Image (cartoon, grey):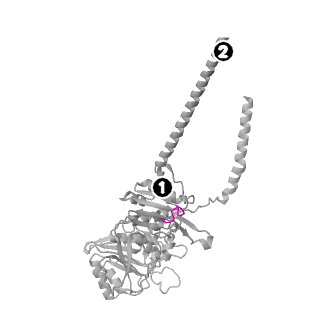
């Protein structure tokens, strides 16, 4: 009996020791699992978001374009983005995109700055009036502010007919343009010619040129010579012809390797200007261009309001894929008396390149000035016509681009194609001055398209999901129950 009494406390102590060891082991194991989980979380957070988060949005909101990736890969200086937003009110679209930028290169990083907590922070970067949601980009001593309203674009073109407003996420375009402007070394001076009733560039175009480092100035050839810093000249839809002296000044400028962009219209007679263009192998195609291929004119207007074919070559290479340009009431351009395709003249060392063309189903309406309706006449030429061309003189280095559409560089046509005309202008200027011509980043649609069920499928699908499938499940359940009972 006494031995049994002595054995019980010993067994009890052994049981308690085992329980203590088991508890200690479980505690250590739990702590180890917790530490591993925390470390794993930290490790995952350190991995760039492009490897841990997948963009499943239909328009690829957070998928960086090739243009942006090339820009970030080429950074040779650190860029920091400061996102101005109240804590808890950040736009997840913007922060996710900034994470993607940071994941591409260690040269880019971003931080949030709450204006309530840092009321004087933006002022040191000349952005005291920046709205909440803006992004300040800083590189060394240089900085640029991307306003909050630049991160989204809105299309009201269908508002009065359908009541809908198109929403586009343009943050990548705005941020990449800001980084490019911030890290760009130097810039270019382009002068708009005046004194001949020229149209002024629309704001869309001036903004595009500013984003590629262009400083715009004005120049009256009658009053002053072409400045030495002029990288290119722009003659935009003159309503009067140039004087002989003006043409001579342009001729001298081009013979010295200058660059000239000209837009004209079919309603203005400019024989002196046409003579200068003829020296570079270009002449007007008589008549108003009319497109009969529905894919190449605007549905809301008609065949004379062209959506021309954008040719694939180095001049328009900066236009984003899938973009259109709009050319209302345009006239054709012929080269060397009728050549309408890329050709090279050995004698003059001129290279002619088509930029914008109609389809092969277009025609040039010769009696447009007296006709009551747009209709093809018996003598109207039919075929493919170029309405924008480029000439390059290998002997002098001169580069000349002619767009035979008076309203091509106005804001309204540009808005109709979501900025395609402005992108082409930036691409042309980049080609003229020899700058890198990367494609522009296109804004991404955030509009949700409702799933439309065809009327003919409504009844069959209703029967399938409301009657047949539930009935099938019920019968299957009954069959399984009966089978189990029989076992």
Image location (x, y in percent) of residue 273: 35, 84
The foreground one among 192 and 467 is: 192
Say which residue appears at 51% left-offset and 60% top-offset.
94
Image location (x, y in percent) of residue 278: 32, 80
The crowding category of the residue bearing disc 1, from other C-alpha atoms within 10 Å (few below 14, some 14 to 19, many at least 20), is some
Image location (x, y in percent) of residue 99: 48, 55
How many marks do you count on the picture? Answer: 2
Report which residue position mark 1 lands on: 99
The foreground one among 478 and 240 is: 240
Image location (x, y in percent) of residue 342: 34, 70
- Which stretch is magenta? 114-120
Query: From the viewer's perspective, is residue 272 above or below residue 319?
Result: below
Looking at the figure, which quarter contains the C terminus? top right
Q: Are marks 2 and 1 in contact (CB under 8 Å)?
A: no
Residue 360 can be seen in this image: no
The foreground one among 380 and 295 is: 295
Say which residue appears at 26% left-offset and 73% top-offset.
349
Say which residue appears at 70% left-offset and 46% top-offset.
469
Q: Quadrant of residue 243?
A: bottom left
Q: Quadrant of residue 431?
A: bottom left
The foreground one among 20 and 178 is: 20
- Left or right, 438 with respect to 11, comes to left
Residue 227 colored in magenta in the image:
no
- Left or right, 471 with respect to 143, comes to right
Report which residue position mark 2 lands on: 5
Q: CA distance from mark 2 to mark 1?
A: 70 Å
Q: Quadrant of residue 189?
A: bottom left
């Amino acid at each position: 009996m006494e031995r049994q009494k002595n054995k019980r406390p010993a067994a009890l102590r052994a049981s308690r020791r085992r329980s203590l060891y088991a508890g200690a082991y479980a505690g250590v194991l739990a702590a180890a699992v917790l530490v591993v989980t925390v470390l794993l979380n930290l490790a995952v957070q350190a991995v760039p978001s492009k490897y841990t988060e997948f963009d499943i949005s239909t328009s690829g909101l957070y998928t960086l374009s090739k243009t942006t990736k090339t820009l970030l890969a080429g950074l040779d200086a650190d860029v920091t983005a400061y996102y101005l937003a109240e804590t808890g009110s950040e736009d997840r679209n913007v922060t996710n995109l900034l994470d993607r930028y940071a994941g591409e290169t260690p040269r880019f990083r971003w931080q949030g700055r709450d204006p309530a907590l840092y009321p004087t922070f933006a002022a040191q970067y000349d952005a005291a009036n920046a709205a909440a949601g803006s992004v300040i980009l800083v590189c060394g001593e240089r900085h640029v502010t991307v306003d909050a309203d630049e991160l989204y674009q809105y299309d009201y073109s269908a508002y009065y007919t359908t009541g809908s407003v198109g929403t586009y996420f343009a943050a990548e375009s705005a941020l990449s343009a800001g980084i490019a402007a911030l890290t760009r070394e130097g810039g270019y001076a382009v002068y708009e010619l005046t004194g001949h009733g020229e149209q002024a560039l629309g704001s869309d175009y001036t903004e595009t040129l500013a984003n590629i480092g262009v400083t715009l100035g004005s120049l009256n050839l009658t009053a002053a010579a072409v400045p030495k810093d002029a990288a290119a000249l722009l003659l935009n839809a003159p309503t009067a012809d140039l004087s002989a002296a003006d043409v001579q000044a342009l001729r001298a400028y081009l013979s010295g390797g200058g660059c000239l962009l000209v837009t004209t219209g079919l309603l203005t007679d400019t024989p002196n200007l046409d003579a200068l263009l003829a020296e570079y192998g270009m002449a007007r195609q008589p008549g108003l261009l009319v497109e009969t291929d529905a894919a190449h004119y605007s549905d809301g207007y008609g065949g004379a309001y062209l959506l021309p074919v954008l040719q694939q070559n180095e001049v328009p290479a900066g236009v984003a894929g899938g973009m259109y340009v709009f050319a209302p009431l345009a006239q054709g351009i012929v080269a060397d008396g009728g050549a309408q395709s890329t050709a090279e003249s050995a004698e003059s060392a001129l290279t002619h390149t088509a930029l914008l063309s109609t389809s092969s189903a277009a025609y040039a309406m010769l009696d447009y000035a007296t006709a009551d309706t747009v209709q093809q006449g018996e003598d109207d030429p039919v075929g493919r016509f170029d309405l924008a061309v480029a000439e390059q003189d290998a002997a002098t280095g001169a580069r000349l681009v002619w767009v035979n559409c008076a309203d091509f560089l106005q804001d309204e046509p540009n808005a109709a194609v979501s900025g395609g005309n402005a992108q082409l202008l930036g691409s042309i200027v980049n080609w003229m001055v020899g700058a890198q011509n990367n494609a522009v980043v296109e804004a991404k649609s955030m509009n949700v398209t409702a799933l439309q069920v065809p009327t003919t499928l409504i009844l069959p699908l209703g029967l399938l999901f409301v009657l047949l499938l539930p009935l099938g499940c019920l019968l299957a359940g009954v069959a399984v129950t009966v089978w189990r009972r029989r076992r």
